[in-house]
Image: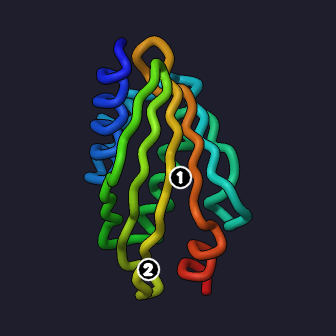
Amino acid sequence: MSAEENKRLVVETWSALGKGQLDAAIANMSDNVRWLVPGNIPGVSGLKRGKEEILKFMAGVGQAFPEGLQSEIRRSYADGNTVILELVNRGKTANGRLYENDYCFVFELEAGKIRRIREYVDTQKAKEILLG
């Protein structure tokens, strides 16, 4: 796949995640996909291995944001099999607080599927809003 096709696949996958279309999003990931979330937020941070762990993680995101989490992609970049999304996530948390945080995601693709996701975010801010 070309860099532009990879970028389109990642943006479509992210959009599907945001809409709760988990089956469509997971279909674009390799069976051995890995998602690394930084920080030390219980139940959030750490390495998610495989589609099942990512589905479990997304269910937790749904519980933390019962009204949904809106993503605004500000920029997207593609070079070969690597795609970078800069975005802001916003939503109302289960504890009633308003959440807004900037993110950068690095996606690595292989054979037309997402195989690795690295997430960069202000984890201290996330922790304070989610658990504070």
Taking the image as shown, residue 41 lies to the left or right of residue 89, namely right
Q: Which residue is drawn at 28% across and 46% down?
A: 15
Residue at image mark 2 = 94
Q: Is mark 1 on a helix, strand or loop?
A: helix
Q: In this view, does 30 lie above or below 124?
A: above
Q: In which quarter of the image is the C terminus?
A: bottom right
Q: Position of residue 85 (x, y in %)?
A: 42, 44
Relative image position of residue 12 (x, y in whole percent): 28, 37
Mark identifier at residue 118 = none
- The crowd level at tag 2 (other Cα within 10 Å; few <14, some 14-19, many 20+) is some
The correct choice, above or below, for 75 with respect to 29 in the image is: below
* Relative height, residue 90 to residue 92 (above, below): above
- Measured Cα–Cα span from mark 1 to mark 2: 16 Å
Q: In this view, does 45 lie to the left or right of 55?
A: right
Residue sticking out furthest to the right: 40
Q: Give amino acid for label 1.
A: Phe
Which quadrant would residue 71 be assigned to in this image? bottom left
| Earlier-in-chain disc, 1 versus 2 | 1
Q: Which residue is drawn at 46% across and 39% down?
A: 84
Do callouts 1 and 2 mark residues in contact (Cβ within 8 Å)? no
At label 2, the amino acid type is Ala
Q: Residue at x 68, y 44 (%)?
A: 47
List x then y, in percent, for residue 4.
31, 23
Could you tell me which secondary element the residue under label 2 belongs to?
loop
Q: Which percent across, then down, holds residue 131?
A: 61, 81
In-image side of 97 versus 11 (left or right): right
Residues 80 and 107: in front is 80
Residue assigned mark 1: 57
